Image (spheres, rainbow, N blue to C red):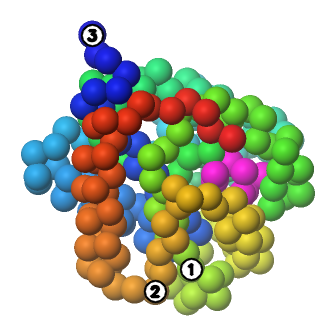
Amino acid sequence: KFENNKNRGAFILFEGCDRAGKTTQATKLFEYIQSLGHPVKLWKFPERKTLIGQVIDEYLKKTRELDDRTIHLLFSANRWECVSTMKENILNGTTLIVDRYAYSGLAFSAAKGLKLEWCKYPDKGLLTPDIVFFTDLSSEDAAKRGGFGEERYENQSFQKKVREIYLSLKDPTWKILDARKSISELHDQIGKMSLTIIQKCKELPLKEDLF
Ligand code: 2DT
């Protein structure tokens, strides 16, 4: 049995605009932390493999239409169904590197016009990340990176709104990173900050007070 505040892993979150290198950096960080011998896992939201995740996947691939509030709640439920496993891992000393989380939920749903306060409510009380790396890229620069994909939301005007909302959400746990920097420069920056937070978290309780 674990204690809540001794030698736990860190909850490291990546958020950011599309095509800003979020997944690349999360993967590189995972490999780096692993190479140092720390227990670490890589997670991604939405978790498309669960039953709820399959519905979300169909929605994103545009083979299913859902009301804006309905899909918002499903994204949130998809986090809640994973939360006990995430918590167990962290309290057992595993660092979790998570690619997207509740901030994506807020930014994408609010960009459609839903009220931010309404959007926040279902994620209230989720596990709180220890650090948030926000890879920031303007929608113009994102568009230059070989264009957007075929899934829902992958267009420049929507991404511009998403970025504005994201930036309005930042708090002191956020590190805003200039995604125009090289992959290795960003990785060095992220790696250093992550090792610091992993050490610090060993002595800090895991918080469950998001929003
Ligand atoms: P990727 O798999 O390419 O990251 O795209 N999204 C994600 C939401 O609208 N709400 C959420 O809560 C989450 C986690 C962002 C996933 C797409 O789903 C959007 C892009």
Determine if the C-beta at disc 2 is less than 8 A from ligand 1.
Answer: no
**Does any portion of residue 67 appear in the rendered image?**
yes
Q: Amino acid at mark 2?
A: Arg
Q: Amino acid at mark 1?
A: Leu
Residue bearing mark 1: 137
Name the residue located 55 percent from the left edge and 75 percent from the top edge.
136
In the image, is residue 143 part of the stretch drawn in magenta?
Answer: no
In the picture shown, does residue 164 fall above or below 194? below
CA gap, disc 3 and disc 2 = 44 Å
**How far across and how far down the image is residue 21, in percent?**
43, 71
In the picture shown, does residue 110 fall above or below 145? above
Numbered mark located on residue 180 in the image: 2
Depth check: give the residue in front, 148 or 31.
Answer: 31
Magenta stretch, main secondary structure, is: helix
Quarter of the image holding residue 27? bottom left
Name the residue located 64 percent from the left edge and 29 percent from the top edge.
125
Q: Residue 207 vs residue 197: left or right? A: right
**How far across and how far down the image is residue 72, in percent?**
75, 41
Q: Which residues are magenta?
A: 103-109
Residue bearing mark 3: 1
**Does any portion of residue 86 appear in the rendered image?**
no
Label 1 residue SS: loop
Mark 1 and mark 2 residues within 8 Å of each other at the beta carbon: yes
Mark 3 and mark 2 residues within 8 Å of each other at the beta carbon: no
Name the residue located 20 percent from the left edge and 53 percent from the top edge.
33
Depth check: give the residue in front, 5 or 38.
Answer: 5
